[in-house]
Amino acid sequence: MEKSNKLGFWVLTALVIGNMVGSGIFMLPRSLSEAASPAGVISAWLVTGFGVLMLALVFGSLAIRKPNLTGGPQIYAKELFKSGSHASTLSGFMSTWGYWIGNLAGNIAMITTFAGYLSTFFPILTSDANWFTIGHFTLKVGNALTFLVCSLLLWGTHFIILRGLESAGRLNFLATAAKVAGFVFFIIVGLFAFEQSNILPFTAPRMDEAGHAIGIMGQINGAAVNTLWAFIGVESAVVFASRAKKQSDVKRATILGLFIALGIYIGISTLVMGMLDQNTLIHSDKPLIDAIQTVLGPIGGKLLAGIGLISLFGSTIGWLMLTAEVPYQAAKQGLFLPAFLKENKKGLPVFSMIVSNGIGQLFIFSTVSKSISGAFDFIIVIATLSYLVPYLISSVYQLKLVVKGETYKGKQRMADGMIALLATFYSVWVIIAGTADLKTFMYGMILLASGILFYRPKTKKKKAANQKTKRALSA
Protein backbone atom coordinates (compact mmCIF):
# COMPACT_ATOMS: atom_id res chain seq x y z
CA MET A 1 0.00 0.00 0.00
CA GLU A 2 1.16 3.51 -0.72
CA LYS A 3 2.75 5.26 2.24
CA SER A 4 0.39 8.21 1.71
CA ASN A 5 -2.52 5.93 2.61
CA LYS A 6 -1.11 5.03 6.03
CA LEU A 7 -2.86 6.49 9.10
CA GLY A 8 -1.06 8.09 12.05
CA PHE A 9 -1.97 8.16 15.77
CA TRP A 10 -4.03 11.37 15.72
CA VAL A 11 -5.96 10.42 12.58
CA LEU A 12 -6.73 7.01 14.14
CA THR A 13 -7.84 8.72 17.37
CA ALA A 14 -10.06 11.07 15.37
CA LEU A 15 -11.61 8.07 13.61
CA VAL A 16 -12.40 6.47 16.97
CA ILE A 17 -13.90 9.67 18.43
CA GLY A 18 -15.61 10.65 15.20
CA ASN A 19 -17.21 7.25 14.69
CA MET A 20 -18.37 7.02 18.31
CA VAL A 21 -19.54 10.60 18.73
CA GLY A 22 -21.86 10.66 15.73
CA SER A 23 -25.63 10.39 15.60
CA GLY A 24 -25.87 9.07 19.15
CA ILE A 25 -24.85 12.28 20.85
CA PHE A 26 -27.61 14.19 19.07
CA MET A 27 -30.50 11.76 19.40
CA LEU A 28 -29.83 9.56 22.44
CA PRO A 29 -30.77 12.08 25.16
CA ARG A 30 -34.39 11.72 23.97
CA SER A 31 -34.30 7.89 23.67
CA LEU A 32 -32.67 7.48 27.08
CA SER A 33 -35.09 9.78 28.88
CA GLU A 34 -37.93 7.71 27.48
CA ALA A 35 -36.33 4.47 28.73
CA ALA A 36 -35.03 5.55 32.14
CA SER A 37 -35.08 8.18 34.89
CA PRO A 38 -32.05 10.47 35.31
CA ALA A 39 -30.57 8.01 37.82
CA GLY A 40 -31.07 5.15 35.38
CA VAL A 41 -29.54 7.10 32.49
CA ILE A 42 -26.40 8.10 34.42
CA SER A 43 -26.00 4.55 35.80
CA ALA A 44 -26.37 3.09 32.30
CA TRP A 45 -23.62 5.40 31.00
CA LEU A 46 -21.25 4.38 33.79
CA VAL A 47 -21.91 0.65 33.39
CA THR A 48 -21.61 0.87 29.60
CA GLY A 49 -18.47 2.99 29.83
CA PHE A 50 -16.82 0.35 32.03
CA GLY A 51 -17.96 -2.51 29.78
CA VAL A 52 -16.76 -0.79 26.61
CA LEU A 53 -13.43 0.01 28.29
CA MET A 54 -12.95 -3.74 28.83
CA LEU A 55 -13.81 -4.34 25.17
CA ALA A 56 -11.43 -1.59 24.05
CA LEU A 57 -8.60 -3.19 26.05
CA VAL A 58 -9.41 -6.53 24.40
CA PHE A 59 -9.34 -4.95 20.92
CA GLY A 60 -6.06 -3.18 21.64
CA SER A 61 -4.42 -6.33 23.00
CA LEU A 62 -5.52 -8.47 20.04
CA ALA A 63 -4.32 -5.86 17.54
CA ILE A 64 -0.82 -6.13 19.04
CA ARG A 65 -0.79 -9.91 19.66
CA LYS A 66 -2.41 -10.90 16.36
CA PRO A 67 -1.38 -8.19 13.87
CA ASN A 68 -2.05 -10.55 10.95
CA LEU A 69 -5.79 -10.66 11.80
CA THR A 70 -6.93 -7.31 10.43
CA GLY A 71 -10.30 -5.89 9.51
CA GLY A 72 -12.22 -5.69 12.80
CA PRO A 73 -13.46 -7.77 15.74
CA GLN A 74 -15.54 -10.09 13.53
CA ILE A 75 -12.37 -11.59 12.00
CA TYR A 76 -11.55 -13.42 15.24
CA ALA A 77 -14.58 -15.71 14.79
CA LYS A 78 -12.72 -17.99 12.40
CA GLU A 79 -9.87 -18.38 14.90
CA LEU A 80 -12.16 -20.08 17.42
CA PHE A 81 -12.18 -23.23 15.27
CA LYS A 82 -9.62 -25.39 13.47
CA SER A 83 -7.88 -23.46 10.72
CA GLY A 84 -9.32 -24.17 7.27
CA SER A 85 -12.33 -26.06 8.61
CA HIS A 86 -15.89 -25.45 7.43
CA ALA A 87 -16.82 -24.27 10.95
CA SER A 88 -13.99 -21.73 10.85
CA THR A 89 -15.05 -20.33 7.48
CA LEU A 90 -18.77 -20.28 8.28
CA SER A 91 -18.36 -18.58 11.67
CA GLY A 92 -15.98 -16.00 10.20
CA PHE A 93 -18.37 -15.27 7.33
CA MET A 94 -21.51 -14.99 9.49
CA SER A 95 -19.79 -12.77 12.05
CA THR A 96 -18.46 -10.52 9.28
CA TRP A 97 -21.86 -10.44 7.62
CA GLY A 98 -23.65 -9.33 10.80
CA TYR A 99 -21.01 -6.70 11.54
CA TRP A 100 -21.10 -5.37 7.97
CA ILE A 101 -24.90 -5.14 7.86
CA GLY A 102 -24.84 -3.45 11.28
CA ASN A 103 -22.47 -0.87 9.81
CA LEU A 104 -24.77 -0.28 6.86
CA ALA A 105 -27.74 0.30 9.15
CA GLY A 106 -25.66 2.52 11.45
CA ASN A 107 -24.57 4.67 8.52
CA ILE A 108 -28.17 5.46 7.74
CA ALA A 109 -28.86 6.45 11.35
CA MET A 110 -25.97 8.91 10.95
CA ILE A 111 -27.18 10.24 7.63
CA THR A 112 -30.83 10.61 8.67
CA THR A 113 -29.71 12.52 11.78
CA PHE A 114 -27.77 14.88 9.46
CA ALA A 115 -31.03 15.56 7.63
CA GLY A 116 -32.78 16.18 10.95
CA TYR A 117 -30.28 18.87 11.95
CA LEU A 118 -30.33 20.40 8.49
CA SER A 119 -34.04 21.01 9.03
CA THR A 120 -33.06 23.71 11.54
CA PHE A 121 -32.02 25.81 8.54
CA PHE A 122 -34.57 24.35 6.11
CA PRO A 123 -37.82 23.57 8.01
CA ILE A 124 -39.39 22.25 4.82
CA LEU A 125 -37.50 18.98 5.49
CA THR A 126 -40.06 18.22 8.22
CA SER A 127 -43.09 19.35 6.21
CA ASP A 128 -46.17 17.10 6.51
CA ALA A 129 -47.70 18.48 3.31
CA ASN A 130 -48.69 15.77 0.82
CA TRP A 131 -46.71 15.69 -2.43
CA PHE A 132 -48.58 12.91 -4.23
CA THR A 133 -50.59 9.77 -3.52
CA ILE A 134 -50.42 6.36 -5.24
CA GLY A 135 -53.04 3.93 -4.00
CA HIS A 136 -52.75 3.78 -0.20
CA PHE A 137 -49.28 5.36 -0.17
CA THR A 138 -48.89 9.11 0.33
CA LEU A 139 -45.46 10.72 -0.05
CA LYS A 140 -44.98 13.80 2.11
CA VAL A 141 -42.84 16.71 0.96
CA GLY A 142 -40.57 16.51 4.01
CA ASN A 143 -39.90 12.79 3.60
CA ALA A 144 -39.12 13.16 -0.11
CA LEU A 145 -36.64 16.01 0.49
CA THR A 146 -35.05 14.11 3.39
CA PHE A 147 -34.53 11.16 1.05
CA LEU A 148 -32.80 13.42 -1.50
CA VAL A 149 -30.54 15.05 1.14
CA CYS A 150 -29.53 11.66 2.57
CA SER A 151 -28.75 10.28 -0.90
CA LEU A 152 -26.60 13.31 -1.79
CA LEU A 153 -24.64 13.02 1.47
CA LEU A 154 -24.06 9.29 0.94
CA TRP A 155 -22.71 9.52 -2.60
CA GLY A 156 -20.92 12.84 -2.10
CA THR A 157 -18.93 11.29 0.74
CA HIS A 158 -18.33 8.19 -1.40
CA PHE A 159 -16.47 10.23 -4.02
CA ILE A 160 -14.52 12.19 -1.38
CA ILE A 161 -13.12 8.93 0.05
CA LEU A 162 -12.21 7.61 -3.41
CA ARG A 163 -9.90 10.61 -3.85
CA GLY A 164 -7.57 9.15 -1.18
CA LEU A 165 -7.70 7.60 2.29
CA GLU A 166 -5.23 9.97 3.93
CA SER A 167 -7.01 13.11 2.65
CA ALA A 168 -10.37 11.70 3.78
CA GLY A 169 -8.82 10.90 7.17
CA ARG A 170 -7.56 14.45 7.52
CA LEU A 171 -10.99 15.82 6.66
CA ASN A 172 -12.46 13.55 9.31
CA PHE A 173 -9.84 14.83 11.79
CA LEU A 174 -10.80 18.48 11.15
CA ALA A 175 -14.50 17.68 11.53
CA THR A 176 -13.79 15.79 14.78
CA ALA A 177 -11.77 18.70 16.18
CA ALA A 178 -14.66 21.05 15.35
CA LYS A 179 -17.21 18.79 17.02
CA VAL A 180 -15.16 18.38 20.21
CA ALA A 181 -14.78 22.19 20.44
CA GLY A 182 -18.52 22.59 19.87
CA PHE A 183 -19.44 20.09 22.55
CA VAL A 184 -17.10 21.74 25.05
CA PHE A 185 -18.95 24.99 24.30
CA PHE A 186 -22.30 23.23 24.87
CA ILE A 187 -21.08 21.81 28.20
CA ILE A 188 -19.98 25.28 29.39
CA VAL A 189 -23.38 26.77 28.47
CA GLY A 190 -25.17 23.80 30.04
CA LEU A 191 -23.39 24.24 33.37
CA PHE A 192 -24.88 27.73 33.70
CA ALA A 193 -28.34 26.73 32.44
CA PHE A 194 -28.74 23.54 34.45
CA GLU A 195 -32.01 23.42 36.43
CA GLN A 196 -32.05 20.81 39.19
CA SER A 197 -35.85 20.68 39.16
CA ASN A 198 -35.79 19.21 35.63
CA ILE A 199 -34.11 16.00 36.78
CA LEU A 200 -36.43 15.47 39.75
CA PRO A 201 -37.61 12.98 40.80
CA PHE A 202 -34.15 11.52 40.23
CA THR A 203 -35.22 7.88 40.50
CA ALA A 204 -38.74 8.07 39.05
CA PRO A 205 -40.08 4.76 37.67
CA ARG A 206 -40.83 4.28 33.96
CA MET A 207 -43.82 2.34 32.63
CA ASP A 208 -43.75 -0.55 30.15
CA GLU A 209 -46.36 -1.14 27.40
CA ALA A 210 -48.54 -3.11 29.81
CA GLY A 211 -48.57 -0.22 32.29
CA HIS A 212 -46.25 -1.88 34.84
CA ALA A 213 -43.65 0.19 36.68
CA ILE A 214 -39.98 -0.43 35.71
CA GLY A 215 -37.52 -0.14 38.60
CA ILE A 216 -33.99 1.27 38.47
CA MET A 217 -32.33 -2.05 37.47
CA GLY A 218 -34.90 -2.60 34.74
CA GLN A 219 -34.28 0.93 33.49
CA ILE A 220 -30.54 0.31 33.31
CA ASN A 221 -31.20 -2.88 31.34
CA GLY A 222 -33.54 -1.01 29.01
CA ALA A 223 -31.04 1.78 28.42
CA ALA A 224 -28.06 -0.58 27.99
CA VAL A 225 -28.53 -1.16 24.25
CA ASN A 226 -29.01 2.56 23.59
CA THR A 227 -25.93 3.59 25.56
CA LEU A 228 -23.86 0.90 23.85
CA TRP A 229 -24.93 2.36 20.51
CA ALA A 230 -23.10 5.52 21.53
CA PHE A 231 -19.83 3.58 21.75
CA ILE A 232 -20.18 1.59 18.55
CA GLY A 233 -17.07 2.53 16.61
CA VAL A 234 -14.64 2.08 19.51
CA GLU A 235 -13.09 -0.67 17.34
CA SER A 236 -12.48 1.73 14.41
CA ALA A 237 -8.71 1.85 14.89
CA VAL A 238 -8.64 -1.96 15.00
CA VAL A 239 -10.47 -2.18 11.66
CA PHE A 240 -7.78 0.04 10.11
CA ALA A 241 -4.89 -1.71 11.90
CA SER A 242 -3.37 -2.85 8.59
CA ARG A 243 -3.32 0.79 7.43
CA ALA A 244 -1.76 2.19 10.64
CA LYS A 245 1.75 3.63 10.51
CA LYS A 246 2.53 1.87 13.81
CA GLN A 247 0.64 -1.06 15.38
CA SER A 248 1.17 0.38 18.87
CA ASP A 249 -0.88 3.41 17.82
CA VAL A 250 -3.98 1.24 17.47
CA LYS A 251 -4.36 0.50 21.19
CA ARG A 252 -3.37 4.02 22.27
CA ALA A 253 -5.83 5.63 19.85
CA THR A 254 -8.62 3.29 20.98
CA ILE A 255 -8.20 4.05 24.70
CA LEU A 256 -7.75 7.81 24.29
CA GLY A 257 -10.70 8.05 21.90
CA LEU A 258 -12.91 6.10 24.31
CA PHE A 259 -12.17 8.34 27.32
CA ILE A 260 -12.76 11.54 25.33
CA ALA A 261 -16.05 10.20 23.99
CA LEU A 262 -17.17 8.98 27.42
CA GLY A 263 -16.54 12.41 28.94
CA ILE A 264 -18.55 14.08 26.16
CA TYR A 265 -21.45 11.64 26.43
CA ILE A 266 -21.88 11.74 30.20
CA GLY A 267 -21.44 15.52 30.33
CA ILE A 268 -23.91 16.34 27.57
CA SER A 269 -26.48 13.67 28.45
CA THR A 270 -26.63 14.86 32.07
CA LEU A 271 -26.75 18.55 31.18
CA VAL A 272 -29.54 18.13 28.59
CA MET A 273 -31.70 16.48 31.26
CA GLY A 274 -31.19 19.57 33.39
CA MET A 275 -31.88 22.04 30.58
CA LEU A 276 -35.19 20.54 29.40
CA ASP A 277 -38.06 19.09 31.39
CA GLN A 278 -38.62 15.37 30.93
CA ASN A 279 -41.76 15.67 28.80
CA THR A 280 -40.15 18.12 26.36
CA LEU A 281 -37.02 16.00 26.11
CA ILE A 282 -38.89 12.76 25.40
CA HIS A 283 -40.81 14.35 22.49
CA SER A 284 -37.87 16.22 20.93
CA ASP A 285 -36.44 15.37 17.48
CA LYS A 286 -33.45 17.67 18.10
CA PRO A 287 -32.84 17.59 21.88
CA LEU A 288 -29.47 19.38 21.91
CA ILE A 289 -30.74 22.25 19.79
CA ASP A 290 -33.93 22.54 21.84
CA ALA A 291 -31.82 22.59 25.01
CA ILE A 292 -29.42 25.32 23.93
CA GLN A 293 -32.27 27.43 22.52
CA THR A 294 -33.68 27.72 26.03
CA VAL A 295 -30.51 29.67 26.92
CA LEU A 296 -29.25 31.37 23.75
CA GLY A 297 -32.42 31.49 21.66
CA PRO A 298 -32.66 30.69 17.94
CA ILE A 299 -29.09 31.90 17.26
CA GLY A 300 -27.70 29.34 19.70
CA GLY A 301 -29.80 26.64 18.06
CA LYS A 302 -28.50 27.49 14.61
CA LEU A 303 -24.90 27.59 15.89
CA LEU A 304 -25.20 24.15 17.44
CA ALA A 305 -27.00 22.80 14.38
CA GLY A 306 -24.07 23.99 12.25
CA ILE A 307 -21.61 22.23 14.57
CA GLY A 308 -23.83 19.16 14.43
CA LEU A 309 -23.77 19.13 10.63
CA ILE A 310 -19.96 19.35 10.60
CA SER A 311 -19.80 16.58 13.20
CA LEU A 312 -22.15 14.28 11.33
CA PHE A 313 -20.39 14.92 8.02
CA GLY A 314 -17.08 13.89 9.59
CA SER A 315 -18.67 10.82 11.15
CA THR A 316 -20.17 9.86 7.81
CA ILE A 317 -16.70 9.92 6.24
CA GLY A 318 -15.31 7.70 9.01
CA TRP A 319 -18.19 5.21 8.92
CA LEU A 320 -18.26 4.83 5.14
CA MET A 321 -14.50 4.21 5.22
CA LEU A 322 -14.94 1.61 7.94
CA THR A 323 -17.93 -0.09 6.31
CA ALA A 324 -16.09 -0.65 3.03
CA GLU A 325 -12.97 -1.86 4.84
CA VAL A 326 -14.80 -4.69 6.66
CA PRO A 327 -15.70 -6.97 3.69
CA TYR A 328 -12.43 -6.01 1.95
CA GLN A 329 -10.33 -7.26 4.87
CA ALA A 330 -12.62 -10.28 5.27
CA ALA A 331 -12.02 -11.18 1.62
CA LYS A 332 -8.27 -11.02 2.31
CA GLN A 333 -8.83 -13.64 5.04
CA GLY A 334 -10.82 -15.82 2.61
CA LEU A 335 -14.13 -15.08 4.36
CA PHE A 336 -15.88 -13.02 1.67
CA LEU A 337 -16.32 -13.13 -2.09
CA PRO A 338 -13.03 -12.41 -3.93
CA ALA A 339 -14.71 -9.56 -5.84
CA PHE A 340 -14.45 -7.46 -2.67
CA LEU A 341 -10.66 -7.46 -3.07
CA LYS A 342 -10.83 -5.14 -6.07
CA GLU A 343 -8.92 -1.88 -5.44
CA ASN A 344 -8.48 1.37 -7.30
CA LYS A 345 -5.09 2.91 -8.10
CA LYS A 346 -4.89 4.39 -4.58
CA GLY A 347 -5.35 1.03 -2.85
CA LEU A 348 -8.94 1.71 -1.81
CA PRO A 349 -11.57 -1.08 -1.89
CA VAL A 350 -13.64 0.39 -4.71
CA PHE A 351 -15.92 -2.62 -5.28
CA SER A 352 -16.66 -2.91 -1.56
CA MET A 353 -17.50 0.80 -1.42
CA ILE A 354 -19.90 0.60 -4.36
CA VAL A 355 -21.72 -2.43 -2.96
CA SER A 356 -21.80 -1.09 0.62
CA ASN A 357 -23.13 2.30 -0.36
CA GLY A 358 -25.53 0.77 -2.87
CA ILE A 359 -27.10 -1.29 -0.07
CA GLY A 360 -27.00 1.80 2.13
CA GLN A 361 -29.08 3.60 -0.47
CA LEU A 362 -31.75 0.93 -0.02
CA PHE A 363 -31.76 1.58 3.75
CA ILE A 364 -32.31 5.27 3.04
CA PHE A 365 -35.74 4.39 1.67
CA SER A 366 -36.80 4.02 5.34
CA THR A 367 -36.90 7.84 5.48
CA VAL A 368 -39.71 7.88 2.92
CA SER A 369 -42.27 6.39 5.32
CA LYS A 370 -40.83 7.05 8.81
CA SER A 371 -40.13 10.17 10.79
CA ILE A 372 -36.46 10.94 11.45
CA SER A 373 -36.68 9.92 15.11
CA GLY A 374 -38.72 6.81 14.28
CA ALA A 375 -36.18 5.65 11.70
CA PHE A 376 -33.35 6.30 14.18
CA ASP A 377 -34.95 4.31 17.02
CA PHE A 378 -35.70 1.33 14.79
CA ILE A 379 -32.23 1.21 13.24
CA ILE A 380 -30.08 1.56 16.35
CA VAL A 381 -31.50 -1.46 18.19
CA ILE A 382 -31.12 -3.78 15.20
CA ALA A 383 -27.66 -2.44 14.33
CA THR A 384 -26.38 -2.59 17.92
CA LEU A 385 -27.35 -6.25 18.26
CA SER A 386 -25.43 -6.96 15.04
CA TYR A 387 -22.27 -5.55 16.63
CA LEU A 388 -22.61 -7.45 19.88
CA VAL A 389 -21.89 -10.85 18.35
CA PRO A 390 -18.41 -9.83 17.05
CA TYR A 391 -17.73 -8.03 20.35
CA LEU A 392 -18.54 -11.21 22.28
CA ILE A 393 -16.43 -13.29 19.90
CA SER A 394 -13.43 -10.97 20.40
CA SER A 395 -13.68 -11.37 24.17
CA VAL A 396 -13.97 -15.16 23.92
CA TYR A 397 -11.00 -15.31 21.55
CA GLN A 398 -8.92 -13.27 24.00
CA LEU A 399 -9.88 -15.78 26.71
CA LYS A 400 -8.78 -18.60 24.42
CA LEU A 401 -5.33 -17.00 23.97
CA VAL A 402 -5.02 -16.51 27.74
CA VAL A 403 -6.02 -20.09 28.60
CA LYS A 404 -3.64 -21.56 26.01
CA GLY A 405 -0.90 -19.07 26.88
CA GLU A 406 -0.48 -18.24 23.19
CA THR A 407 1.61 -15.06 22.62
CA TYR A 408 1.97 -14.60 26.42
CA LYS A 409 5.00 -14.35 28.67
CA GLY A 410 4.96 -12.93 32.18
CA LYS A 411 2.24 -11.38 34.38
CA GLN A 412 0.19 -9.74 31.62
CA ARG A 413 -1.59 -13.04 31.00
CA MET A 414 -3.56 -12.89 34.27
CA ALA A 415 -4.58 -9.24 33.78
CA ASP A 416 -5.72 -9.84 30.20
CA GLY A 417 -7.67 -12.90 31.32
CA MET A 418 -9.63 -10.84 33.87
CA ILE A 419 -10.28 -8.09 31.30
CA ALA A 420 -11.50 -10.61 28.70
CA LEU A 421 -13.77 -12.27 31.28
CA LEU A 422 -15.38 -8.94 32.23
CA ALA A 423 -15.78 -8.02 28.54
CA THR A 424 -17.47 -11.39 27.92
CA PHE A 425 -19.90 -10.92 30.83
CA TYR A 426 -20.74 -7.42 29.63
CA SER A 427 -21.40 -8.53 26.04
CA VAL A 428 -23.66 -11.38 27.18
CA TRP A 429 -25.57 -9.05 29.52
CA VAL A 430 -26.32 -6.52 26.76
CA ILE A 431 -27.32 -9.25 24.31
CA ILE A 432 -29.80 -10.62 26.86
CA ALA A 433 -31.13 -7.12 27.61
CA GLY A 434 -31.41 -6.23 23.93
CA THR A 435 -33.22 -9.40 22.88
CA ALA A 436 -35.73 -9.39 25.74
CA ASP A 437 -38.27 -8.02 23.27
CA LEU A 438 -39.36 -10.84 20.89
CA LYS A 439 -39.84 -8.52 17.90
CA THR A 440 -36.31 -7.13 18.26
CA PHE A 441 -34.91 -10.64 18.67
CA MET A 442 -36.62 -11.84 15.48
CA TYR A 443 -35.39 -8.88 13.45
CA GLY A 444 -31.84 -9.50 14.70
CA MET A 445 -32.00 -13.21 13.82
CA ILE A 446 -33.42 -12.51 10.34
CA LEU A 447 -30.63 -10.00 9.75
CA LEU A 448 -27.92 -12.52 10.67
CA ALA A 449 -29.59 -15.48 8.93
CA SER A 450 -29.85 -13.55 5.64
CA GLY A 451 -26.10 -14.04 5.26
CA ILE A 452 -26.68 -17.72 4.45
CA LEU A 453 -28.01 -16.68 1.03
CA PHE A 454 -24.58 -15.26 0.19
CA TYR A 455 -22.47 -17.92 1.89
CA ARG A 456 -23.32 -20.69 -0.60
CA PRO A 457 -22.10 -18.75 -3.69
CA LYS A 458 -18.89 -18.01 -1.81
CA THR A 459 -18.23 -21.68 -0.99
CA LYS A 460 -18.99 -22.67 -4.59
CA LYS A 461 -16.37 -20.22 -5.86
CA LYS A 462 -13.89 -21.47 -3.27
CA LYS A 463 -14.41 -25.12 -4.30
CA ALA A 464 -14.04 -24.22 -7.97
CA ALA A 465 -10.78 -22.39 -7.24
CA ASN A 466 -9.45 -25.36 -5.21
CA GLN A 467 -10.29 -27.82 -7.99
CA LYS A 468 -8.58 -25.59 -10.55
CA THR A 469 -5.46 -25.49 -8.36
CA LYS A 470 -5.46 -29.29 -7.96
CA ARG A 471 -5.75 -29.81 -11.73
CA ALA A 472 -2.87 -27.39 -12.30
CA LEU A 473 -0.67 -29.24 -9.81
CA SER A 474 -1.46 -32.67 -11.24
CA ALA A 475 -0.84 -31.57 -14.82
Image (spheres, rainbow, N blue to C red):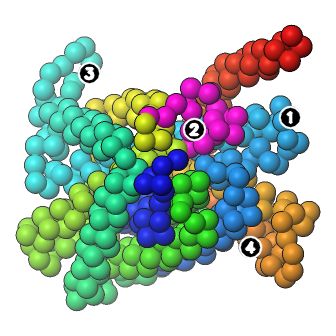
In 3D space, how far apart are the residues under numbered discs 4 and 2 (Cα atoms)?
28 Å
Give the residues drawn in magenta, as a range.
Answer: 326-344
Name the residue beneath numbered marker 4. Answer: 419
Q: Identify which residue is drawn at 58% across, 57% down.
A: 241
Asked if residue 172 can be seen in this view, the reply is no
Q: Which amino acid does label 4 sit on?
A: Ile
Mark 2 — residue?
327
In the image, which disc is placed on residue 458? none
Q: Amino acid under label 2?
A: Pro
Find disc 3 in the rendering and name its residue: 137
Which of marks 3 and 2 precedes in the sequence? 3
Give the Cα separation between the discs numbered 1 and 3.
Answer: 49 Å
Query: For this rendering, which residue is in front, 426 or 475?
Result: 475
Q: Do the residues labelled 3 and 4 touch (CB within 8 Å)?
A: no
Find disc 1 in the rendering and name its residue.
Answer: 85
- The mark that comes first in sequence, 1 or 3, is 1
